[in-house]
Image (cartoon, grey):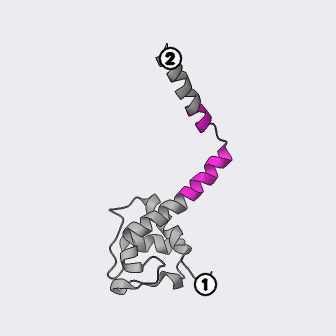
Amino acid sequence: MKSIFSFLIFAALIYACSSSNAETRATSSISDKAEDGEKIYKTYCVTCHGVNGDMGGSGAFDLTKSQLTLEERIKIISEGRNMMTPFKELLSKEKIKAVAEYIETLRTDQ
């Protein structure tokens, strides 16, 4: 009897947590992407580009001055450039796009 009661409480909690509306889930998904882009950037890019994108370690481009389009940033992250490592074998296309979108927030001339 206790196990059935526990199961019902557990099921009710799952239902209550998962019954958020589609708009909330879409907003959450967008913020998760931005957060993921920042997290991935801080994991792989901060060593050369710095936290704010302007460190220039190992000849890294100053991302605060970047005028590249989203597609151009995705291509460079995927294929690399000059001394930069290509990330297409390490990160999924979605993660590369998330990083490229995050880099846009580092620009100082927006």
Q: Quadrant of residue 19?
A: top right
Q: Amino acid at mark 1?
A: Asp
Relative to 69, residue 10 above or below: above
Magenta span dominant secondary structure? helix
Q: Position of residue 75 (x, y in %)?
A: 43, 71
User: Residue lying farthest front?
Assistant: 2
User: Residue lying farthest top?
Assistant: 1
Q: Which residues are magenta?
A: 14-32
- Looking at the image, which residue is at 34% across and 71% down? 86
**SS category of the residue bearing label 2:** helix
Between the C-alphas of marks 2 and 1, the distance is 60 Å
Q: Position of residue 67 (x, y in %)?
A: 54, 82
Is residue 21 something one can see in this rendering?
Answer: yes
- The foreground one among 44 and 11 is 11
Q: Quadrant of residue 49?
A: bottom left
Provide the residue designation for mark 1.
109
* Residue count near mark 1 (Cα–Cα under 10 Å), binned few <14, some 14–19, many ≥20: few
- Looking at the image, which residue is at 39% across and 73% down? 45
